[in-house]
Image (cartoon, grey):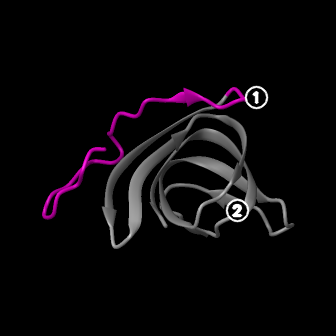
Amino acid sequence: MCPVKPNSAIRAADLELTLEPVPDSSARTGVHTLTEFGGLEIGVWEMTPGVMPDVEADEVFVVLSGAATVEFADGTAPLTLGPGDVVRLAAGTETVWTVTETLRKVYLAG
């Protein structure tokens, strides 16, 4: 963990992440936990182009860079994501992420 101390800043867009292969995909993902605050984990997550199924945590995130589509198994309309988007995902939601430009987000997860 790279803790964010009170009254300090970290450049989330420039933070180096170790990327790992996504099983059965050409994509790679990386995550870096920054700190915990009020019972939430706060961190930076990145995915390179490719497709990945996921089961979501309860989370809010802000897209810093990149482009992706998130499809929902329950038939909810897909989300098209880009820089500046703020998204809320519910725990247990089954999704498929299709990243077309490496996506980086700052997340808060409970």
> Which residue type carries mark 2?
Leu
Please give left or right for residue 94 compared with residue 100 in the image. Answer: right
Gap between marks 1 and 2 measured at Cα: 23 Å
Q: Which residue is mark 1?
A: 24
Pick the residue in front: 110 or 22: 110
Q: Earlier in the sequence, mark 1 or mark 2?
A: 1
Q: Position of residue 83 (x, y in %)?
A: 50, 55
Residue at 27% from the left image edge and 45% from the top image edge? 2
Residue at 76% from the left image edge and 28% from the top image edge? 24
Q: Secondary structure at mark 2?
A: strand
Does 45 appear above or below 28?
A: below
Please give left or right for residue 86 compared with residue 89 in the image. Answer: left
What numbered label is drawn on residue 79?
2
Q: Which residues are magenta?
A: 1-26
Please give left or right for residue 21 compared with residue 15 in the image. Answer: right
Q: Position of residue 4 (x, y in %)?
A: 23, 55
Residue 29 falls in image quadrant: top right
Mark 1 neighbour density, 10 Å: few (under 14) some (14–19) many (20 or more): few
- Point out the residue furthest to the right here: 75
> Which residue type carries mark 1?
Asp
Q: Mark 1 near mark 2, Cβ–Cβ under 8 Å?
A: no
Mark 2 neighbour density, 10 Å: few (under 14) some (14–19) many (20 or more): few
Residue 98 falls in image quadrant: top right
Q: Position of residue 84 (x, y in %)?
A: 48, 61
What numbered label is drawn on residue 77?
none
Pick the residue in front: 10 or 85: 10
Mark 1 or 2, which is nearer the eye? 1
Residue at 59% from the left image edge and 39% from the top image edge? 101
- Point out the residue furthest to the bottom here: 38
Q: Position of residue 50 (x, y in %)?
A: 69, 35
Does 39 appear above or below 13?
A: below
Q: Secondary structure at mark 1?
A: loop
